[in-house]
């Protein structure tokens, strides 16, 4: 029992002495880009892979003579910045047209025709005629 007490007391002395030593700490300002880069990279890869999985895109790829597997392998080999650029192009490409722009255009046309007295769609307009 005496040797057990000696071992425990020796360990406690070492631990308490070691706890008193100052530890080196590093602090720096971390930019938002550094924190969000891994998340954005995986999101961009998911966007490109979902785009490549669409049937119309697969048909277009096959029409160019490239297999969908080869396209997926090429995307996997791309760097994070290249994938982010490609995902940005995919998001900016019109997919069937800009629906909001079309709705706004239809609203303006109906408003003008309502004001000119050709239609009566909106109750808040007064006809010029």
Image: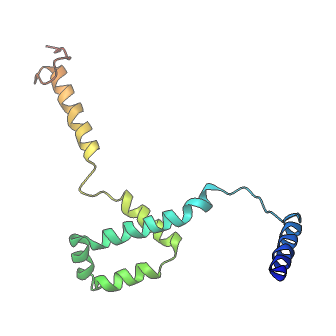
Percent position (x, y) of residue 102?
A: 24, 43
Q: Quadrant of residue 76?
A: bottom left
The C terminus is located in which quarter?
A: top left
Seen in the image, is 25 located left or right of residue 105? Answer: right
Color style of the picture: rainbow
Does residue 38 sit above or below 4 in this rendering? above
Does residue 115 sit above or below 61 in this rendering? above
Percent position (x, y) of residue 58?
A: 24, 76
Seen in the image, is 10 located left or right of residue 40? Answer: right
Q: Quadrant of residue 60?
A: bottom left
For the point 10% across and 24% down, the residue is 119
In the rendered image, the residue lying farthest to the left is: 119
Percent position (x, y) of residue 105?
A: 24, 38
Does residue 31 sit above or below 74 in this rendering? above
In the rendered image, the residue lying farthest to the front is: 1
Seen in the image, is 75 located left or right of residue 19? Answer: left
Number of marks present in the image shown: 0
The N terminus is located in which quarter?
A: bottom right
- Residue 42 versus residue 19: which sits nearer the camera? 19
Seen in the image, is 35 located left or right of residue 58? Answer: right
For the point 89% across and 66% down, the residue is 21
- Residue 1 versus residue 123: which sits nearer the camera? 1
For the point 49% across and 67% down, the residue is 41
- Residue 95 versus residue 106: which sits nearer the camera? 95
- Residue 14 versus residue 121: which sits nearer the camera? 14
For the point 37% across and 69% down, the residue is 48
């Amino acid at each position: 029992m005496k040797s057990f007490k000696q071992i425990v007391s020796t360990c406690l002395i070492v631990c308490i002495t070691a706890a008193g030593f100052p530890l080196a700490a590093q602090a720096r300002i971390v930019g938002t880009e550094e924190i969000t880069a891994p998340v954005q990279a995986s999101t961009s890869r998911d966007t490109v892979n979902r785009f490549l999985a669409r049937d119309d895109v697969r048909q277009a790829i096959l029409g160019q003579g490239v297999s969908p597997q080869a396209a997926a392998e090429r995307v996997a080999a791309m760097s994070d910045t290249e994938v982010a650029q490609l995902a940005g192009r995919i998001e900016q490409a019109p997919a069937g047209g800009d629906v909001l722009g079309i709705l706004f255009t239809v609203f303006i046309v109906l408003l003008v025709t309502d004001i000119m007295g050709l239609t009566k769609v909106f109750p808040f307009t007064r006809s010029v005629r």
